[in-house]
Image (cartoon, rainbow, N blue to C red):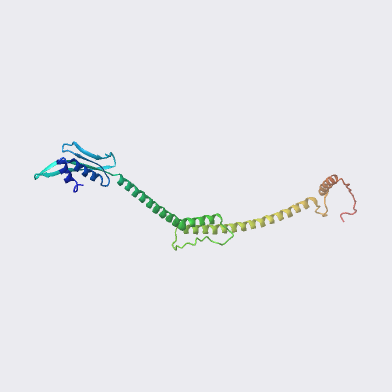
Amino acid sequence: IEKSYTNSLALSVWNFNKNQYKMQLDGILNLEDIVYVEILTPSGKKVISKGVFQESKKISKEFLLQSVDFKKTVTSGKLIVTASLQRVYDDLFNRALIILFTQGIKTLLISLVILYTFYMLVTKHLYAISNYARNINLDSNNKLNLNRYTKEEDELDYIVFALNDMQEKIKKGKEELQHLNENLELKVKKRTTELKELNQELTNLTNIDPLTGAYNRRYFYSISEKLIALSKRENQHLCLAMIDIDDFKL
């Protein structure tokens, strides 16, 4: 604008050639993004204006209109050109959307790769460890093995070692407990047999005469009560035979 219009505009204004400077202003308005132009006198009075004045999203530039008349430089006024920044804002907004979209896709892809890598390296093995711990079988000799590709030991390997050691210790403790239970059952069975024998001996001592080996009066009363009760319950007769044996001691 400065190179193409200001010199000729200055001459047109200085010479009061309205048609010429109107055409020149129209030419400026045809430039991209130019929305408003005006010419002011050196004192600031408006000479002419064209276009639509814009309050916001604009940028204004002032050009001094100077010309040479009879080899003397004269100032005929100043040209103020206002350009709209709407296209710039729209372009920046679109570029920002493109950047956000592309960066969002990149971030999403990177996140998916990180999540998948973390799953393959950590989470999958944690699931295997959890499932093994939940369904641990003490009757099996199988040990937990993650089948990892890395040869260096890390925290996951330490967890596996701890679980395998725990399984082995629990298994040994179970075997010891079973052995103790078997010994306890044998001891209880033995004590029960001894108690039965002792009870039988006590019963024999109570009911059998040690001299003759025959049942005594205590046993007679005990068995009689049982037989009488049985006879009453079954509604059957009960017969008692009393026999005198001569020379019983012999």
Q: Which of 39 and 247 is in front in this view?
A: 39
Residue 31: percent from left, percent from top? 25, 47
> In the picture provided, is 55 more to the left or to the right than 76?
right
Residue 90: percent from left, percent from top? 33, 46
View extreme (front): residue:
19
Q: Quadrant of residue 46?
A: top left
Query: Can see residue 195?
Result: yes
> In the picture provided, is 201 more to the left or to the right than 132?
right
View extreme (left): residue:
71
Residue 17: percent from left, percent from top? 17, 41
Quadrant holding the C terminus: bottom right
Q: In which quarter of the image is residue 187?
A: bottom right
Residue 41: percent from left, percent from top? 17, 38
Query: Can see residue 76?
Result: no
- Residue drawn at point x = 30 percent, y = 44 percent: 86
> In the picture provided, is 166 more to the left or to the right than 95?
right
- Residue drawn at point x = 19 percent, y = 41 percent: 19
Q: Nearer the viewer, residue 176 or 119?
A: 119
Q: Nearer the viewer, residue 22 or 83?
A: 22
